[in-house]
Amino acid sequence: MHDIPLFYEENLSGQNGMVMLSEESSHHIHQVLRLKPGAEIAITNGKGILMQGVLTLVDRKKSIFKITTEEIIPPPENKITICFCIIKNNSRFEWFLEKAVEIGVREIIPVISKRTEKKNVRIERMKQIMIAALIQSKQSWLPVFHEPVTFEKAITLESFDHKFIAHCEEMEKPHLKKFISSGKVQILIGPEGDFTIDEIESALNKDFIPVSLGKNRLRSETAAIVALALLNN
């Protein structure tokens, strides 16, 4: 599968082992990759289904795929939910999303905190960036991207085995790498200007563990990627 193009089709349905591809995938196949009937490709729905097969019809608006193999890919072992405060620079937030998918994350929750300047995100745009990263990294599970929530809501989410908050305030903070990230993990990453003292205290009162990501002061999106890399190690 690593040597053949991978496509994302949210709704995988077909008859007699044949699947009609979306106009978006068909356009890419026909106009960009210039594939011909008989070419091998793979498709996934981002929920663990992976199909491989050959193109039987290629058109810029409608292509047809014949399934030769189909398998269910187990979910990734990591169960990390990152609650990342929205940052005002769109390109930096999109860079974070792309790298988060490549590294591995189960859920992404945009957060609105007291120092968050921007209050919304273009969810469809974010999803397309994540799909592109999924395809590039040859994965079959697309992380869940949620609607933005307030900080107060983020710290009351339940069913996590481990809850961490990374911040820059001076206090006793073990390095995140010292923790084993087994089970369901939640990590909070602040906006430009960091969390407020009141927010940090509120999180600690909800059993969050304060952690350090190193000696250097990091941009928000860099901190988020460092945290994911450490938790996935």
Image (tube, helix red, strand yellow):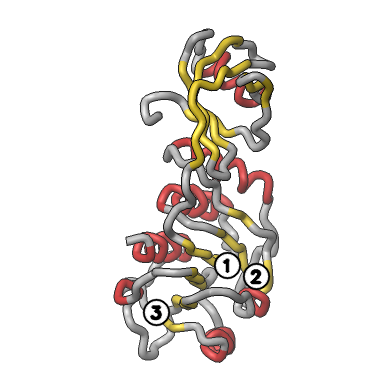
Report the Cα–Cα distance between label 2 and label 3. Answer: 20 Å
Is 17 in front, or is 39? 17
Which residue is at 57% across, 14% downward? 30
For badge 1, the amino acid type reads: Cys
Numbered mark located on residue 85 in the image:
1
Give the numbered dot on residue 101. Answer: none
Relative to 9, say whether 151 is above or below.
below
- The crowd level at tag 3 (other Cα within 10 Å; few <14, some 14-19, many 20+) is many
Q: Tell me which numbered mark, 2 or 3, is placed earlier along the sequence.
A: 2
Q: Viewer-proximal residue, 229 or 197?
A: 229
Circle nearer the viewer, 1 or 3 = 3
Which amino acid, mark 2?
Ile
Q: Quadrant of the C terminus?
A: bottom left
What residue did someone put label 3 on? 211
- First reached walking from the N terminus: tag 1 or tag 3: 1
Quick check: 141 left or right of 172? right
- Would you place residue 137 above or below residue 198 in this image? above
Residue 163, position as x, y percentages in the image: 49, 77
Q: Dot 1, how many residues are within 10 Å of its Cα: few (below 14), some (14-19), or many (20+)?
A: many
Reply above or below: 218 against 34: below
Q: Which is nearer the N-term, disc 1 or disc 2?
A: 1
Which residue bears the numbered disc 2?
112
Marks 2, 3: nearer the viewer: 3
Q: Quadrant of residue 146?
A: bottom right
Tell me the distance, in whole angstroms, between the alpha carbons under discs 1 and 3. Answer: 17 Å
